[in-house]
Amino acid sequence: MIFDHSRTKLLEMNHFLRVLSIILLGLPSLAQEKSPVITPYHAQNIRELYMDSVNHHTALKTILHEDTTALYWQQDSVRRTWFHRKLFREHLFEFREPEYNIFIDFLPDFQVGKSNQDKTLWLNTRGARVQANIGKKFYFETSFFENQGVFPVYLDSFISRKRVIPGQGMIKYNDKIGKAYDFSYVNALISYTPSKFVNFTLGYGTNSYGDGYRSLILSDIGFSYPYLRITGNLGQFQYTSMWAQFMDTEGKSYDQAYEGRGFPKKWGVFHFLDWNATKKLTIGIFDAVIWGDVDTAGNKRSFDFSYVNPIIFLRPAEYSVGSSDNSMLGLNAKYKLFPKTTIYGQFVLDEFRLKEFFSGKGWWANKWATQLGFRSFDLFKIPKLDLQAEVNVVRPFTYSFRNTLANYAHYGQSLAHPLGANFKEALGIASYSYKRWFFRGQVNYTSYGLDTNAESNVGQDIFKSYDKRNTEYGNKLGQGLKTQLIYGQGTIAYVFNPRYNLRVEASAAVRRQKNDLDSRSEMMFNIGFRSTFRQFYYDF
């Protein structure tokens, strides 16, 4: 009995040691299984940064972050079918390894609707997205969208003038689909972070700078463009240099674009310095220079390597000594007024002469823009009830230049606000999420001045040369044909899968534009089955 008892104890000890060795040897692999998942913040989840007690750099987007919720994706007390997991919890294809993650999603966007202008609206989008990261240093993303659609009357008017779908590039005509538009585009991004102090991003997409719904400095309203962005982080400072190539679709006719030369190119360099001055206050300064691929004498210029210098305010200062390029300066700020309420603002200076600014004579080149707004989260202590409101004011001729090769625009749209210049805008956005339900309401009111004919230039159309302005002095905000625009939209959606934002959605919108010469109203209703993080700005 004594021998049997000792043998039993020995066997138990051996078993314990084997289990312990398996656990200890398996710890590295278990830790590796929870490899970090890198993904961009989107409008739906960036609220976390504003509510955090830490003061984050939120102005420059796209912002990459580590999605910690994805580390525990396997933990589920109920065994789910493959269909259930893909519909509600996972990406369509997931490859998770200790060293890397790869996610592939099909992104449909199918909508059908009606306009009170006796028009049936529809959109047929087939998209796909691939995301991958290797550890915490390397992130890659690419997406492709093939689209056909019929748009509301007011957007048709824009498309017929520009031959561009807002934010989505050039249209193609397809006889097989009648009066619908056919268009496609690709976005891509490669991000490398060798250390916590620096990030290199090479992309074909859009960027934005600011904390508002709009950005008067650099917005994501337009079509994709190639860019290189280098961002450094040191203490409370974040400094970014970005070089980009744009296209001038307004400088030559639509047919000329297919002569083998393509549209004329234009270049841009941007610098952003963001400083978390305190736990509540962030101040950012900005400069930009836009220059054409061809100089004023018609000679090929291409990329100007003098702009490789990353020092902020170096090249804009040259404007005062005769630089022919288009330069801008800007200020961005935010302040956490309360733990869940942040106020923010921007100021842009396109051109400035101190004497003229304070003379009060309305000199045409007193070109500036300003923004003031706030974001409030969990309003009335209701979780995920959020409110945002802001006011934007842009003086006449801001963002314009003597030619379209150097104006502040790309692919037929402004790089800042979709209305160009010479306007005042007030907007409010409320959103609420409850479990998988999502509600959103938006109201815009805008007052602006339009040209009365093709030869007139009151400063609203940034694609017209400011050399052909109506008057030297006496320019004021909203001059020209006084126009009022009201836009409202309400959306209700049920989100099946937040991983790739798969949802069913119903929305209604109304747009009313009125001036002394014309009055136009359009009401639209849409229902759809959607899966996209794309954000389009049709509220203009």
Image (spheres, rainbow, N blue to C red):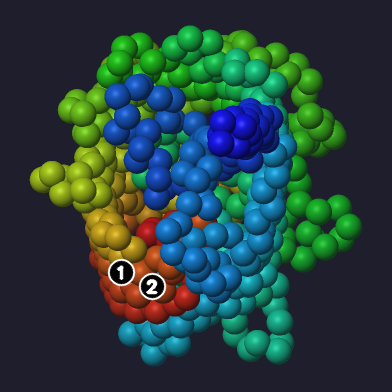
**Residue type marked 2:** Glu
Q: Position of residue 337 (x, y in %)?
A: 19, 26
Image quadrant containing the N terminus: top right
Residue 58 in sight: yes
Q: Is residue 393 above or below residue 387?
A: above
Q: Closer to the camera, 94 or 426? A: 94
Q: Which residue is drawn at the image coordinates 76% and 31% (left, top)?
A: 295
Q: Residues under labels 2 and 1: Cα distance?
A: 6 Å
Q: Which residue is drawn at the image coordinates 13% and 44% (left, top)?
A: 381
Q: Which residue is mark 1?
A: 492
Q: Secondary structure at mark 2?
A: strand
Q: Is residue 208 left or right of residue 98?
A: left
Q: Which residue is drawn at the image coordinates 30% and 24% (left, top)?
A: 53
**Residue type marked 1:** Ile
Q: Closer to the camera, 134 or 236? A: 134
- Count of marks overlaid on the render: 2
Q: Position of residue 477 (x, y in %)?
A: 30, 40
Q: Is residue 76 above or below residue 322?
A: below
Verify CB contact (< 8 Å) between mark 2 and mark 1. Answer: yes
Q: Secondary structure at mark 1?
A: strand
Q: Which residue is mark 2?
A: 505
- Name of the residue lying farthest toward the right: 260
Q: Quadrant of residue 149?
A: bottom right
Residue 161 in sight: no
